[in-house]
Image (cartoon, coloured by chain):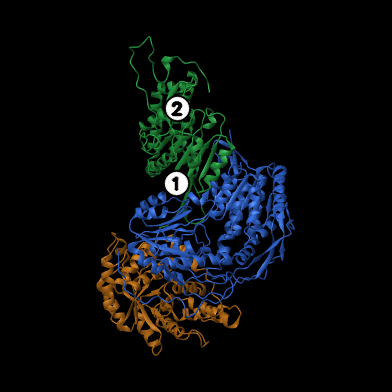
Chain colours: A orange, B blue, C green
Amino acid sequence: MSRMYSPTMPSVYIDQVGVEERVSRLNKRSIKKSSKRSMLNLAMSMLDLTTLEAKDTPGKVRQLCTKAMHPHDLPTIPAVAAVCVYPNLVRTARECLRGSKVKVAAVATAFPSGMSSRKVKLEETRWAVNEGADEIDMVISRGHFLSGEFRYVSDEIAAVKEACGDAHLKVILETGELSTLDNVRLASDLAMYAGADFIKTSTGKVQPAATQPVTLVMLEAIRDFYYDTGKKIGMKPAGGIATAKQALAYLVMVKETLGFDWLTPELFRFGASSLANDILMQLIKEETGVYQSLDYFSKD
Amino acid sequence: MARTSKKQTALKFRGEWEYAPAPESKDHIRLEKKYGLFINGKFSEPRSGKYFDSVNPADETLLASVAEAGAEDVDLAVTAARSAYEKTWSKMPARERGKYIYRIARLMQERARELAIIESMDGGKPIRESRDIDIPLAAAHFFYYAGWADKLEYAVPGRTAGPLGVAGQIIPWNFPLLMAAWKIAPALAAGNTVVIKPAETTPLTALKLAEIIRDADLPSGVVNIITGAGSTGSALVNHPGIQKVAFTGSTEVGKMIQKTLAGTDKKYTLELGGKAANIIFEDAAIDQAVEGIINGIFFNQGHVCCAGSRLFVQEPVAAKVIRKLKDRMETLLVGDPLDKNTDVGAINSKAQLDKIHKYLKIGVNEGGEMYQTSCKLPSRGFWCRPTLFTDVSQSSRIVQEEIFGPVLSVQTFRTVEEAIEKANNIPYGLSGGVWTDKGSKIFRVTSQIRAGVIWANTYNKFDPVSPFGGYKESGMGREGGLHGLLPYIQTYSN
Amino acid sequence: MEQTEKKKSETLNGTRPNGQEGNKRVSVRKTYKLYIDGKFPRSESGRYYALTSPEGEMLANICRSSRKDFRDAVVAARKAQPAWASRSAFNKGQILYRLAEILEGRTAQFTAELVSMGVSESRSKQEIQASIDRLVYYAGWTDKFHQVFSSVNPVESSHFNFSVPEPTGVVSIIAPEENGLLGLVSVIAPAIAGGNTVAVLASSAYPLTAITFAEVVNSSDVPAGVVNILTGYRSELLSWFSNHMDVNAVVYCGSDAEEIRLVGENASLNVKRPVILSPGDWYSPQEENPYRIMELQEVKTTWHPIGQ
């Protein structure tokens, strides 16, 4: 009970082997034909097309935005959910995406490490929102979390949420640094009770990034939070999801853990870059009946 | 800590769209129209002249016509087994015996998919289970015991080991091929020969195993597979030429067999019914426990003697567990056993379905609150929705009696002592489940539950190295692992 | 059975007064009763049978137990079983060893009883010594048979899996008719060494040592109810010993085919474990082995995940 952060937050135990068995069983779902097509289209619409490199330029971001709004000539293929960039490229993305429904997401709070003062983190958040970000992807202070300073972590999330104003807040737990699924669950609950709109696995800068067991634990946390509070929190696995097959496996987890309500870009996102083209290849294969080559898909 | 959860709109798991059908292809399956008895290394017409039908419980179509062994056929099979025992199998170097058993394991692996599909067609179990559990485990069982053949003396410290003779074995319809493996593999490893009778509703994979045994060039008569119903089994048990009886099935029949064998020199093992308690403490990993409850009762349509059919939930988490359970049940897909997405297949037979329905009625009449999932059921075949009963008590018949179907009863408890007392308050003692994150509590509870297999923070796990079998009216003797070898061994003082 | 001529002075009931020694002290004789739940009651039925020496001399009135005495013994055994099973293996070993110690100290009394029942003095000594040694033998197994017969099973999945023997529970025992002391000890010791509790029917021909052994049990830190010893007629009690629904295993010593069949059939009522023992020679070293313990054990297998 010492790990319980507040009397209102449940203390939940996680059994790693049980989680892995559940994932393995979920992965046995066979997705064929009509369900495959609709799930691939859904996955496309849930993409946070991401570029988070120090070498990013306005030119690169503009290319990405074009792809985000118009992934393929086939009219049935939807636009992605958002483009995710560093704060200094938010303005470029905002201009590029004007008129489309694609959102601009910005990482903030001394991404990816979070190793800065709260003042700087809040300032960065406000700046990114000011530049036009619809969504803020913040990182939690893993050092504080692992040393048991849960209130620090929680207060920080609450403060960033306030700084976001109307922008949606995604809280990155960086599960690859949290070591155990018990910690993943605790961090998920901390983030949701502190005001997160989404919880997100990873920055993409740490291995392992998103994994299915971690995602399942987070989805179950979201489910419990919904039943306890009535609030629907979104989920975003990020990093390491490169194939359509993996994306379908994640959607199966969502479908069977949270149900149809969460099968929408409002509540589920993929943080990925190369995934888009693999989804496209699979969709075109479904369309044409022949296996595809990457030569026919733009790399942006 | 107890939390009162506000009423929220239930999560939606059905209605918008479903996974498209993903049936396993059965083009490559070859079944004969008619199967004889496998005696002395070949298939032959039954002396009885009688045949019965094996039907696919998912669509009620005829799969094959199968011979019904009469007393004369049983006698032929036992004679063949005796002769093989005396002339070849007990004389053969143990190492060579082991190599034959390894061959069987390998041939099963090679034909695994075919066996899985036939298992699902004949018995109604989902292909996911026959493909991933039944068939691989059956092959692994042969592989495990093959290695024992030349190492028997290490199983009985201080003694010398030898075979018993001819083993008469009777297996049930819930895990047809796996149960055949559980019976045949240790018997052969110890140097015995076998006459085995598969269940009358599920004989086909055993007959395929006969083909495999033939292909493995096992000496004729070492394994004889005779199909039939109760009277065939009774003729086998009572045959004076067998030295060992191994039976898996109901407690009712097991008691009859034990009575029949009284005063004879035949050794026997019985693996009988169960009504296992699955106990969820408030400090359990709840989501994984819910998954364990699901696996505990809905695995193989609940046609499992060790099914966790009595759920006990500690009161502070009872409401939460039941809600999660209902959510999870909604995601179970019931239907075509050959569909790769099917979670719950067909009930094995009309008779079994009638029995389950009888208990559902009893449960409702006793005042139980019945909850069933909203899934659609196919129009042909034998089906039962995943079912949960709350508001039941220890005295309810659905809590006391083995239903052998996808029916779970839920009770709550307050203290550890109460949970243990209720768990043990039953004539059965096959298995049990305990869920808590607290290590010391696990060891206390697992040591006090009077049952042969205890799953702590897991459920319905099986492995060839792991002994399985019951206390009390759930039977005697173990199958699997080192302990499963012992019932097939005779020991001598050094 | 050996018939020997005994001197009056050595008989069980002490020196008997006779004409010449009219002033001698009158000895206090012992009343032989049952041993149930740590107490020595008479049979609730009030029935008895007279035990006489081979010379026809009256030795004692022996309680002729009824089915209700047996029922009481099973109730006591059931009540005592969980606590006895949960005693540490070391403690059970100490208590069995204590039985041997007390028995050794009472050698004279047991010799006198055996002799009075017709066993030669040398044979009596041999039987008592063998009984003592048998107790010591099983005392030594209490903390070892688990190690020899347990296993850690290397399953394929990520689970720790192990199998250990546990007592089957309450055992009813029809002790051998021959070797009234050694036979009794040979069947009780492995049963209780393994954590079971027992209700035993002693030899009807040699009941004295059985009840005196109950006194040894009673003074050896064996908790009440762990060992219950009845005397009486096998023919009257055999069905009750084998058909009781709260008995987990029945041990039958003997070779009567009809009785063996009856025990087996009755055992099937609740799937009791029937153990039929028909050894030619209770002295044989082969009668000492851990498999006697294992016949009254259940193997429990436990699974647990290995994870974070």
Q: Quadrant of the N terminus of chain A?
A: bottom left
Give the crowd class for mark 2: few <14, some 14-19, many >=20 residues within 10 Å.
few
Query: Quick check: can you spot residue C296?
Result: no
Given the image, on which type of amino acid does mark 1 rest? Asp
Q: Residue at x 43, y 58 (%)?
A: B278
Between B282 and C41, the one lying in front of the other is: C41
Which subunit holds the residue at mark 1?
A: C
Given the image, on which type of amino acid does mark 2 rest? Ala
Residue ranking furthest to the bottom: A99
Query: Splitting the image into 4 quarters, where does residue C59 fall?
Result: top left
Query: Splitting the image into 4 quarters, where does residue B214 fall?
Result: bottom right
Q: Residue at x 51, y 88 (%)?
A: A75
How far apart marks 2 and 1 lie (CA) works out to 32 Å
Q: Is residue A115 left or right of residue B162?
A: left
Query: Quick check: can you spot residue B418?
Result: yes
Which subunit holds the residue at mark 2?
A: C
User: What label sits on residue C50 in the rendered view?
Assistant: 2
Between C60 and C93, the one lying in front of the other is: C60
Label 2: state its secondary structure: strand
Label 1: state its secondary structure: loop
Would you place residue C144 above or below residue A197 in this image?
above
User: What label sits on residue C246 in the rendered view?
Assistant: 1
Q: Earlier in the sequence, mark 2 or mark 1?
A: 2
Q: Residue at x 41, y 88 (%)?
A: A100
Would you place residue A25 above or below residue B183 in this image?
below
Q: Position of residue B222 (x, y in %)?
A: 69, 49
